[in-house]
Amino acid sequence: MNSEHTDRPGHNFSLGRGAGFLVTTAAALLIGLLLLRSLPGPTSGGPPSSETFLAGVAGGSTTIAADEEITTSRRNTIVRSAERVGPAVVSISVIQVRVVRTGPFGSLFRDPMFQYFFPELQQEYHQQIQNMGSGFLVDDNGHILTNEHVVENASEIVVNLADGRQFDARLLGSDPALDLALLKIDGQDLPSAPLGDSNDLIIGEWAIAIGNPYGYIMEDSRPSVTVGVISAIGRNFDPRRGRIYRNMIQTDAAINPGNSGGPLVNSIGQVIGINTFIFTETGGSLGVGFAIPIDTAQRMLEEIITYGEVRPFWTGIHIQSLTPAIAQSLGYDSTDGVLISQLDPVSPARRAGLHVGDIVVAFNDQPIGDENDLIAEFYGAHVGDRIALKIWRQGQIKQVVFTLTEPQQRG
């Protein structure tokens, strides 16, 4: 049945459903052709290419620009820092020689009394153990900084660069107390890592740990990168196994076995510390790692390159801890500090005006609580350093200043 529509008197129009569909379709085609003609085409006048069509309809130029922006944003400060330092990070493989003592009765032989009365039963032999760690080149002359415990008692040291090259290395010198060592390799076109300033750190800034964790498993000299922040600075630890860890940098960047000796890097690609040890319950990282400040390492580096060793110094001071009884006898109302019990004749300390019975309460403005504090502060010093000791003497605080000298300068 047709539908009817009356527009004006005398003009009757009748429109079927089929005819309406054709008219609608024709209109749509016409509009489509008009849109296509409005699009820019190639200079030849032919139909628009797929590239032109996408550019005009989908905004292809905007998409390309967005892709480039994303790619650029991926190359952030962490990526650039890792690229700057990574080539200079090395994997260190060593053969360590350890002395092993045994006896015929197992654990009983380890008793000091048993060893004293039956020394002839002691058996001793040398055992070779493989150890791995990390390090980094500090110049193009082949000098490499690492931890001393990585190369301790090493009979053979092999260094693998990130580019696949391998070198035999020699130990130029070390400071076992500070757990630092300097190696040397001979090669051409060696990369190096720029050194920063560990006295200019901000808690919360980015920290990047680079090294070769578990390198003995992966057998790959290319370093890995972990990221965290500077969690704290100036961390001090009591001496342990003959090592002094002072003013340490704390970070939550993952540090695992094999990372020891590798660099801790800031966000501008400068080495600010040497990754050294972690607190762990499982053997892996718990986000509490510590690095030796690079400024401490640089001083050792300069000493060894210039003098061939870390020169020993002489103060002439002999000390002992304060007990409540000693403090009371001196009229000193605390046990914080260290008592000077003896002074060598003509020593730098005696010449500077120190007296037996003085109590050292500060070293270069760092408070001294006990013997360990004072010993640790001196371990970080070098020949030629000017030392300011704040002392308590008969109820008064005084300051005595002297310069550290080499032992052969005595007298």
Image (cartoon, helix red, strand yellow):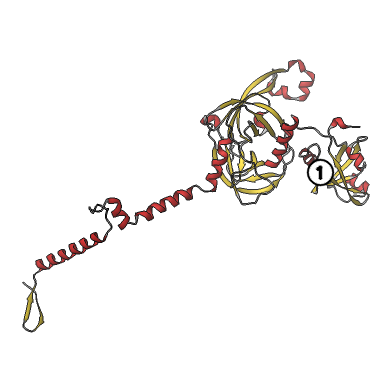
Residue type at numbered disc 1: Asp
Q: Give the vertical position of 216 relative to 395 (above or below).
A: above
Q: Which residue is mark 1?
A: 370
Q: Residues within 10 Å of mark 1 (few under 14, many from 20)?
A: some
Residue 366 appears anywhere in the view: yes
In the image, what residue occupies the spot 89% across and 46% down?
A: 327
Q: How many marks?
A: 1
Q: Quadrant of the C terminus?
A: top right
Residue located at (59% from left, 40% from top): 255
Vertical arrangement, residue 336 with respect to residue 91, above or below: below
The residue nearer to you, when weighing 315 against 24, is: 24
Compared across the picture, whether 326 is left or right of 176 comes to right
Residue 352, position as x, y percentages in the image:
90, 42
Task: Report the quarter where the N terminus lies.
Answer: bottom left
**Which residue does the image show at 89% across and 40% down from the upper left?**
349
Work out whether 225 lies above or below 161.
below
Q: Is residue 103 left or right of residue 64?
A: right
- Secondary structure of the residue carrying tag 1 is loop
Residue nearest the observer in this picture, 259 or 23: 23
Please tell me in which quadrant of the rendered image residue 178 appears: top right
